């Protein structure tokens, strides 16, 4: 039963049990549950619960790290289960988590969905400085530069990217997309980013709209 698997997924992430989390993910896949659904309805609510407990002081850094480790393992496994679309390239995306920020679980899910939808993706990883985004986007001839920020203190990197693109006269060459838990449509509008997406599926929809892909 899917509902049970989602409950178990939440539970193992809160417990921070990496081997058991992998077992639950494998069991879900074995039962034919879609990997994205397993993430969206099980593991992501689980890590969000951990975030809430951490934020309210009911769980501490060592436990956060254990849960994060379990979440990274599961995300790797489930991302591999999202098929890559080898058809005609839909567009070229450069993506990374901004400087000072090591949160990359959500960004890797975004990468998988872009690949599943036929985009060519260059993932710069995490803690990426603004000049690196621009340099790599140029080399990769990207259509879109995507940035992820999970900390209120690192969201400024997304604003800095807009400023540096404008200064370099490159704002028309690359579209920009921003995301990450504290990032909002309002923030995107304020800094002049071309798109904001709440989750990975929405990111693909937004990217296609930016590039006029039907
Ligand atoms: Co950190 N952390 N963390 N953490 N952590 C948060 C973000 C926090 C909200 C927890 C809390 O206090 N409630 C808080 C930030 C508070 C704030 O900024 N005001 C916090 C803190 C404080 C910290 C540290 C400072 C803790 C410390 O050391 N004292 C530290 C900072 C380290 C640093 O970056 N310099 C830290 C460290 C860590 C870990 C390393 C332990 C681990 C990260 C491991 C990793 O990523 N490899 C971690 C985790 C796991 C979290 C929480 C619990 C979960 C984040 C996550 O993976 N969510 C998080 C709480 C939370 O966000 N609720 C928290 C699941 C993921 C699927 O969602 O990343 O939002 P998300 O991605 C979504 C969408 O946002 C969207 O699509 C994704 C898929 O649906 N999306 C995009 C993301 N990027 C996109 C890009 C796009 C489009 C959409 O276009 C380009």
Image (spheres, grey):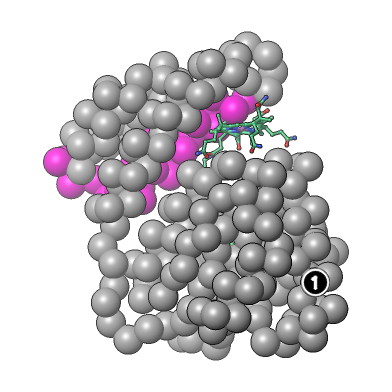
Q: Secondary structure at mark 1?
A: helix
Q: Is residue 87 visible?
A: yes
State how many labels appear. 1
Q: Position of residue 160 (x, y in %)?
A: 80, 62
Beta carbon at label 1 within 8 Å of ligand 1: no
Quadrant where the N terminus sits is top left
Task: Please tell me whether residue 97 is drawn above or below residue 139 in the rendered image.
Answer: above
Asked if the magenta segment contains residue 133, the reply would be: no
Q: Residue furthest left?
A: 30
Is 136 placed left or right of 131 in the picture?
Answer: left
Quarter of the view holding residue 167: bottom right
Q: Position of residue 86 (x, y in %)?
A: 27, 77
For disc 1, the marked residue is: 164
| Secondary structure that dominates the magenta span | helix
Neighbour tally class for label 1: few under 14, some 14-19, many 20 plus, Cα within 10 Å: some
Residue nearest the observer in this picture, 51 or 65: 65
Which residues are drawn in magenta? Answer: 30-52
Is 179 placed left or right of 17 in the picture?
Answer: right
Task: Please tell me whether residue 109 is drawn above or below residue 177 in the rendered image.
Answer: above
Q: Position of residue 200 (x, y in %)?
A: 49, 58
Q: Position of residue 38 (x, y in %)?
A: 34, 42
Residue at point 26% right, 63% down?
83
Q: Is residue 201 visible?
A: no
Residue at point 27% right, 24% down?
19
């Amino acid at each position: 039963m899917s509902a049970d698997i989602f409950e178990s997924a939440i539970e193992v992430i809160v417990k921070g049990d990496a081997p058991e989390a992998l077992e639950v993910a494998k069991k879900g896949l074995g039962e034919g549950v879609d990997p994205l659904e397993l993430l969206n309805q099980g593991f992501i609510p689980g890590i969000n619960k951990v975030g809430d407990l951490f934020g309210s002081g009911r769980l501490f850094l060592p436990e956060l790290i254990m849960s994060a480790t379990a979440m990274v393992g599961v995300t790797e496994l489930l991302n591999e289960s999202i098929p890559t679309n080898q058809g005609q390239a839909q567009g070229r995306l450069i993506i990374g988590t901004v400087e000072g920020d090591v949160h990359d679980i959500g960004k890797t899910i975004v990468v998988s969905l872009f690949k599943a939808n036929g985009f060519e993706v260059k993932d710069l990883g995490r803690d990426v400085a603004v000049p690196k985004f621009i340099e790599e986007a140029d080399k990769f001839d990207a259509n879109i530069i995507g940035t992820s920020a999970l900390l209120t203190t690192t969201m400024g990197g997304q604003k800095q990217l807009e400023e540096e693109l404008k200064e370099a006269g490159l704002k028309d060459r690359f579209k920009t997309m921003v995301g990450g838990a504290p990032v909002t449509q309002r923030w995107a509008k304020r800094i002049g980013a071309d798109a904001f997406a709440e989750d990975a599926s929405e990111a693909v929809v937004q990217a296609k709209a930016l590039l006029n892909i039907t």
